[in-house]
Amino acid sequence: MRFDLAVIADWIEPKATVLDLGCGPGELLAHLRAVKEVVGTGIEKDEDEVATAIGRGLTVIQGDMNEEIRDYPDKSFDYVILSQTLMQVFDPARIIGEMIRVGRYGIVSFPNFGHWRCRAQLFFRGRAPVTRELPYQWYDTPNIRVIAYADFTRFCRTFGFKVLNEAAVRERAGGGSGARVTRLKNLLATHGVFMLAR
Amino acid sequence: MSEYAGSFASPGVSVGKVEKLFARLAEPPGVLATECGAGLGPVTLAYETYGRLNADRSNAVLVCHALSGDSHLAGYYREDDPKPGWWDLMVGPGKGLDTERYFVVCANVLGGCMGSTGPGSENPATGRPFGATFPVLTIGDMVKAQKLLVEHLGIERLLAVVGGSMGGMQVLEWAVRYPEAVRGAVPLATTTKHSALAIAFNEVARQAIMTDPAWRGGDYSADEPPSHGLAVARMIGHITYLSDAAMRRKFDRRLQDRCEIGYTFEADFQVASYLRHQGQKFVERFDANSFLYLTKATDYFNLENAWGGGSLTAAFSRALARFLIVSYTSDWLYPTYQSKTMVQALKKAGKKVSFCEIEADFGHDAFLLPSERLTSLISGFLATLAREEA
């Protein structure tokens, strides 16, 4: 499992209720169900991934997360997760606002654009960075935003999102393992993981 | 409201030979009180079962058929039957509704004409067929009768209720009428209430029957039914089950048994010939009055008014089941937005709901066609329910 997902799983209390936005084929939800006995729901727009997730017995709704999240009453879930999808969200402040409305806690993870490899590629080659974490060319990327760890911290302050926990992580090649970064986070972390609340 | 004209022989193992059974329910002094205020009893339901009920009676799955369906889900009555039951591709050993694991039950609806009590049955009070004196039924009445059958079979709680179209309406009704009795609800290609468009098509179909002089106010004899009206009604229905894309692919403007248009009112086009054929075939197996009663029941169906004082969220708040809702991209009879309305209300009611919109250009009928996608959705959903039960 991706290391940022392992960090997220670590933060979640056993038997909690979880909403996973952009859940894909349900990797995280299946893991959380197995190790934390969570009651999970996923939202995913791709029919194939939705079918895979439902086929493995998960509760998943096919649809656009921006619209689907609106229907939930306040505090419907303990945790609402947005893992490595924030780069594709049109209105990040609104979706995060919704996450911490329908959940007690929101958890967001994203690849750090401030990582030294991104900086080095831009600085030395003068070209848009293409890295393990952000493997796309400018013309085929699904991402509409680049997010640096430091920018996200400032964003939370600007919009008044309370940061309850944060992890700067450095994922090793292959993605299955990694380590926490404690110094020079914006330079050394490949990913940021944040737990937010109102 | 579906089209069962083409059953598909399915890959995999068949349930083999099956038998239609009959249950006499609501025997005196009992009576089945219909929503319109009448009392019916005793009532017969024709049904079939597949697989075995387990010791703690926790593996029963009820399948609700659509408008023109019947209790014959899968397998064969006789070795020389040309076709298996209407959902043979979904029901059998190792299939979506795995008869090695689940005890599958399907009954012909109340008001139907395939062995269950309906307008063609004899009215015990007069000794003659009910005809149009049969009480106007609702989806709720059909479900009440099914509940009696399920109790008759000694089943307190169903693992799941599954059905498409009119069968999907019954699934929804089951989940809110008998919350304790349903653990999983799988409504396919259906709606919580007919749109004006759906009512309009049904009304035209009914008018085709009722304006056939042979209908005689519903009091026709078995050997002189309003065949023409029923055939036209079927043709109208059939159009609504297809889609522009499906019809283009299947027929386009191709001509039938000729190279040029004939300048007559013969069935020049393949689509015209096909519809005429479907109409004729339907007349041989279906009763015109049943068609009127069943279509009217679907028009009257309104889950939010019946159970939620106009609020679908309030209606679904009653339910205890998990839901798996499936719609099809090209279904213009019960379009996806109607399924999304259900999903939205279930979310607001705090219920567990999964939803998948399957890309298919076959129109409303897609749920009856071979689909690995639907098979894996249903089997995954049921497996989780069964695991949680254990």
Image (tube, coloured by chain):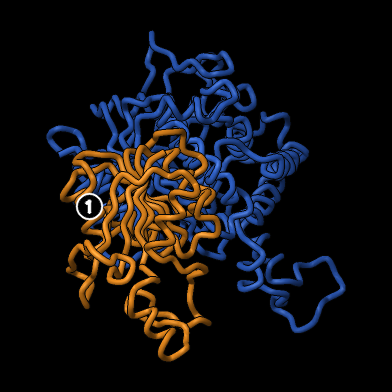
Chain colours: A orange, B blue
Closer to us: B248 or B85? B248
State whether residue B25 is above or below residue A119. above
Q: Residue furthest front?
A: A184
| Residue B127 percent coordinates (x, y) | 53, 19
State whether residue B366 is above or below residue A159. below
| Residue A81 percent coordinates (x, y) | 35, 51
Q: Quadrant of residue B137?
A: top right
Q: Is residue B81 left or right of residue B203?
A: left
Q: Quadrant of residue A153?
A: bottom left
Q: Is residue A116 left or right of residue B211?
A: left
Residue at image x 61%, y 59%? Answer: B242
Is residue A104 visible in the rendered image? The answer is yes
State whether residue A185 is above or below residue B353. below
Closer to us: A40 or B364? A40
Residue at image x 52%, y 64%? Answer: B360
Q: Residue furthest bottom?
A: A125
Q: Residue furthest left?
A: B55
Q: Quadrant of residue B254?
A: bottom right
Q: Amino acid at mark 1?
A: Ala
Which of the image's four quarters has the C terminus of chain B? top left
Residue at image x 48%, y 15%? Answer: B33
Q: Is residue B320 left or right of residue A178?
A: right
Q: Secondary structure at mark 1?
A: helix
Is residue B8 visible in the rendered image? The answer is no
Closer to us: B242 or B69? B242
| Residue A135 percent coordinates (x, y) | 38, 79
Mark 1, residue position: A9
> Label 1 lies in what chain?
A
Closer to us: B80 or B308? B308
State whether residue B289 is above or below residue B163. above
| Residue A91 percent coordinates (x, y) | 54, 55
